Image (cartoon, helix red, strand yellow):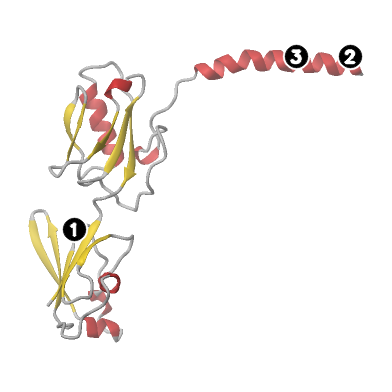
């Protein structure tokens, strides 16, 4: 029985030693769902996330490290990378940007294989101004409403016109306005006014 056990162990070791180099030769995969690559762990992305100005990205081209870089999305919405130069990033999902980078890089390298990792999200901001305790810019939490932003801003001041609060939102280059009556909502009336905020929204408390 000891002989059989020894032979079995040797056979197992031989198979393992043959398979290990083969496994090591398998190419790394740069692409995963949502454009997050194996290059590293990125930020948790909220539903419907698109890249915006000031977001920090890691772009990796497998087998072409000289084209890889950590980049910050500029105010004009573009990023700059070696060889491919300027590429539009703002308004795209990470997967859409990955496809754009593959297309741009294909002019310089054969079969480019890009990965896009969102390292830090700085573009999802909302603003509150006027008669609140702490008017400022705040990070947009997932599902944040007007009422929640007012609370984050320290609440209304004594002489705030709580019936005529306005949310200003820019869509397709045009300003849109949504009225918010704090007294109604606080009394659980007309709750549809308490809309979920979007990046770039400004709440004005007169």
- 114 or 67: nearer the viewer: 67
Q: In the displayed structure, would residue 92 be above or below residue 166?
A: above
Mark positioned earlier in the residue sequence (2 or 3): 2
Residue 154 place in picture, x, y as percent: 27, 74
Under circle 3, the secondary element is: helix
In the rendered structure, are the residues bearing label 2 and label 1 in contact, judged by CB atoms less than 8 Å apart?
A: no
Kindly report the distance in space between the C-alpha atoms of the residues bearing marks 2 and 3. Answer: 12 Å
Residue 31, quarter of the rendered image: top left
Q: In the displayed structure, would residue 95 be above or below residue 22?
A: below
Mark positioned earlier in the residue sequence (3 or 1): 3
Q: Residue furthest right?
A: 1
Please name the residue shown 39% across and 29% down the image: 30
Please name the residue shown 66% across and 17% down the image: 16
Please name the residue shown 27% across and 23% down the image: 67
Please name the residue shown 11% across and 64% down the image: 176
- The reply, left or right, for residue 9 in relation to residue 47 is right
Mark nearest the camera among 2 and 1 is 1
The residue carrying mark 3 is 11
Determine which of the numbered discs, if any, sits on residue 83 in the image.
none
The residue carrying mark 1 is 200
Under circle 2, the secondary element is: helix
Q: In the displayed structure, would residue 143 be above or below residue 53?
A: below
Kindly report the distance in space between the C-alpha atoms of the residues bearing marks 3 and 1. Answer: 64 Å
- The reply, left or right, for residue 12 in relation to residue 149 is right
Determine which of the numbered discs, if any, sits on residue 3 in the image.
2
Where the N terminus falls, by quadrant?
top right
């Amino acid at each position: 029985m000891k002989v059989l056990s020894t032979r079995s162990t040797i056979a197992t070791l031989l198979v393992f030693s043959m398979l290990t180099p083969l496994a090591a030769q398998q190419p790394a995969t740069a692409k995963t769902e949502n454009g997050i690559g194996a290059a590293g762990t990125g930020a948790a992305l909220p539903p419907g996330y698109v890249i915006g100005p000031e977001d920090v990205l890691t772009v990796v081209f497998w087998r072409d490290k000289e084209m890889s870089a950590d980049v910050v999305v500029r105010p004009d919405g573009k990023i700059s990378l070696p060889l491919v130069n300027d590429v539009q990033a703002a308004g795209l999902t990470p997967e859409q940007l990955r496809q754009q980078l593959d297309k741009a890089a294909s002019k310089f390298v054969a079969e480019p294989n890009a990965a896009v990792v969102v390292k830090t999200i700085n573009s999802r901001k909302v603003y509150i101004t006027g008669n609140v305790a702490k008017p400022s810019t705040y990070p947009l939490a997932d599902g944040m409403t007007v009422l929640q932003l007012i609370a984050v801003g320290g609440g209304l001041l004594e002489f705030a016109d709580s019936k005529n609060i306005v949310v200003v939102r820019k869509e397709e280059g045009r300003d849109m306005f949504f009225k918010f009556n704090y007294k109604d909502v606080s009394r659980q009336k007309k709750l549809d006014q308490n809309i979920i905020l979007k990046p770039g929204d400004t709440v004005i408390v007169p």
